[in-house]
Amino acid sequence: MKKIILVLVVIAVAVGAIGFYLWNKPSEYVSDGKPDYTISLVELTNDGKNLSDSIFGTKYVGKAIQFEAEVESVADNKGAKTLTLKTNDDGLVVNAGFHESIADKLSKIVSGDKVKLQCDCSGVTKPESEDDLLSEIEINLTRCNLIK
Amino acid sequence: MKKHILFSISVFFFGLANAQVYSTSTGSVSFVSKTKFEEFSADNKQTQAAISTDKGTVQFKLPINSFQFEKDLMQTHFQENYMESATFPTSIFKGKIKNLADVKFSTDGTYDVQVAGTLEMHGVTKEIEVNGNIVVKGKTITLVSNFSIECSDYGIKIPKNNVSQVSNTINIKVNCALNPKKKK
């Protein structure tokens, strides 16, 4: 009987510890591990232009994408950096967002630099009409990691 | 009479010169959920926002997966269970400033505004009205607002066993600094 109680207590403690760990596990600020897609930026932007929002979403949203690109500009929002990437298409913007915890890694990145990134895709937004204020197609990438 | 016509023409052209769209792709929107037992928040620093200073129209687009939480489990639940972000990846607000005449975009200052429009989230579109501020400083226009929404209004279901941890009422803070949109 004592053994059974002991086993139950050990199981309860283990389950509690696992639950506590999972509940408090910090979220990932950078995309690491094996990417779901290793593609060119051209392939990604073509899909952003040609696929519907929902099909693009099903294919890419929440997935880790590794690609190479050229930096067009660097923006800072309270420590969180965003790289706007060159696309050769005025009507299409790709924004790669970085968490403030890795801002130092980007301190030397300037316009014109070639970079290799791994990011989680947040989706594509498209203008709904010609007079839409947000008139560009925009692909948003988040939790980006500077590979090189 | 000549003076009057000249004045009208100059006002017309001055108006055209000032008629501009300001925008950003790196605006901030955060939210807080607060219950007796749990409080958590998340930030989104990839909010697209724009304003037309002559028409008084504003627009926001939020990629849902760009919300960053402190805890991994909350982030996963938010994306997969509550917002279903693979199906509804973006939330969109389109509105119009009701008291546009009170805002002087050419003069630095903080202006109280009321904005009426539609908020599309989780596949549901609902009319809302929010109060906020427009802060004009040089060539930057900052849109600031604090308001609340009800999850149930947007078909976001909170499971019964999570009601003590996740509030149906979500407080949202908007802070987006916009700059003149580059003409192509």
Image: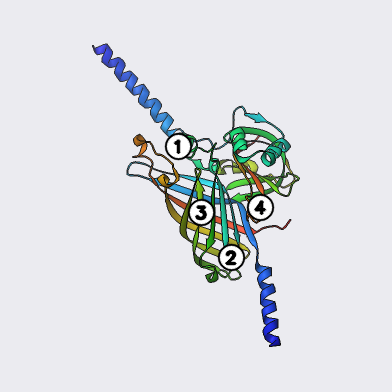
> Which residue is under mark 2?
B137
> Which residue is under mark 1?
B74
Q: Give the percent coordinates (x, y) of residue B19.
A: 65, 66
Nearest the viewer among A89 and A55 is A55
Quarter that holds the C terminus of chain B? bottom right
Nearest the viewer among B51 and B173 is B51
Q: Quadrant of residue B159?
A: top left
Q: Are marks 2 and 1 on the same chain?
A: yes
Which residue: 57% across, 65% down? Answer: B136
> Which residue is under mark 3?
B118
Q: Are marks 2 and 4 on the same chain?
A: no
Q: Secondary structure at mark 2?
A: strand
Which residue: 50% across, 46% down? Answer: B121
The answer to whether residue A115 is left or right of residue A119 is right
In which chain is the residue bearing label 1? Answer: B
Is tag 2's residue or tag 1's residue first in the polypeptide sequence? 1
* Real-space CA distance between mark 3 and mark 1, rounded to the nearest whole angstrom: 27 Å
The answer to whether residue A130 is left or right of residue A62 is right
